[in-house]
Amino acid sequence: FEYGIKNCVASMGTALTRDQAGLLKRYVDEVFISYDSDQAGQMATLRGMTILQEKGLTVRIVLLPAPHDPDSFLRKEGKDKFWEILQKSPSLFEYQLELLVKNCGYNSLESKAKIIRGMFPFLVSIKDPIERALKVASLAQKIQVDESFVQRLLSEEGTSIKHEFLPPRENKEHGTLKAEKMLLRVMMEEKKWRERIKEALQKECFSEGEHQRIFQALLNLPEEDGLLVSKLVDIFPGEATLQSLVTEIATREDLQGVCQNDEAVESLVRRVRLAALERKILALRRELSRGEDPTKLRELNKLDRERERLRRIG
């Protein structure tokens, strides 16, 4: 940013998420993606560019000389040199093909087959038949095989290859966990909800330790509106898991838009409170199963009544 390159963002850690890619798509159609030039950086680039393409973004890959990342390169070489590299950045297709050629070679039938199969996920994902035909022709020319052979393999095996390379479907998120994340998102966006949720919930109402820490951090932030992502991230220096979770909550499309609906927020508060009550009731029953305790029995009855009250409200 200090070098005048203002339309830039950084994913937290190396993993670029689909929600972050969706957020980028709302503002731009073309993305230049750059990670470290080491092996881990190359793998992150491959994962990231696939996610970006799935969202309909045009992707170009910024290739920096080792051992530089964008920050170190700008500091040493300056803005003009960086812009030169941007202008020469290969497309996603060119980058992936060059990586496969570099790793496999194409002097044998086996190596050519590896390259073709390695490119299948990319080719199958192209919806425009004209663009796909052009990419197939370019691939065939690069590794010196007949274009019709690649087309035939693509049509015969494309469906199975596509499914083989699709990322594993994430486990469906537990309803309570999602409700907690939605409440944290609401608190990030509006100070009025930070105060109201603070009165309704304690940090122990959140089931995950990370959620509890973010909740507590939000209560300690300045009284201002707007997404407080950078301030929250700064609170957890060196804690990549928490920083990544903060970014996820702030960027996930399915968590946004709740703060404009008071009834929806209040419903989320009740849901989180009810889940917390269920956990307390379960713990007390386990304790009571080991022996009678009048104090704990009274507390259990009190919690049962509160649970029924919340259930009636809905």
Image (cartoon, rainbow, N blue to C red):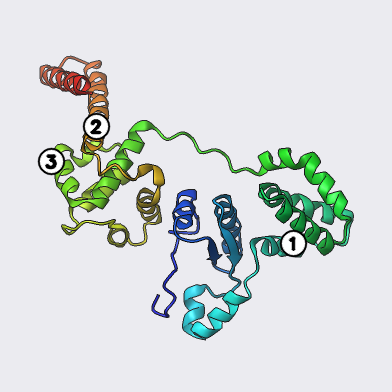
User: How far from the left and from the top, in percent, is residue 103?
Assistant: 74, 61
Q: Is residue 216 left or right of residue 121?
A: left
The answer to whether one can see residue 71 in this image is yes
Q: Name the residue under label 1.
A: 103
User: How far from the left and from the top, in percent, is residue 134?
Assistant: 76, 58
- Camera-nearest label, 3 or 1: 3
| Type of amino acid at the residue the image marks with label 3 | Glu
Q: Residues within 10 Å of mark 2 (few under 14, many from 20)?
A: some
Q: Which of marks 1 and 2 is nearer the N terminus?
A: 1
How far separated are the C-alphas under marks 2 and 3?
15 Å
Q: Name the residue under label 3.
A: 199
Please, what secondary structure does the residue beneath circle 1 have? helix
Q: Is residue 283 left or right of residue 27?
A: left
Name the residue: 45% across, 55% down.
26
| Type of amino acid at the residue the image marks with label 2 | Ser
Q: Name the residue under label 2.
A: 267
| Type of amino acid at the residue the image marks with label 1 | Asn
Nearest the camera: 68 or 49? Answer: 49
- Camera-nearest label, 2 or 3: 2
Above or below, comparing residue 184 to residue 139 in the picture: above
Q: Residues within 10 Å of mark 1 (few under 14, many from 20)?
A: few
Above or below, comparing residue 289 to residue 69 in the picture: above
User: How far from the left and from the top, in percent, is residue 215?
Assistant: 24, 47
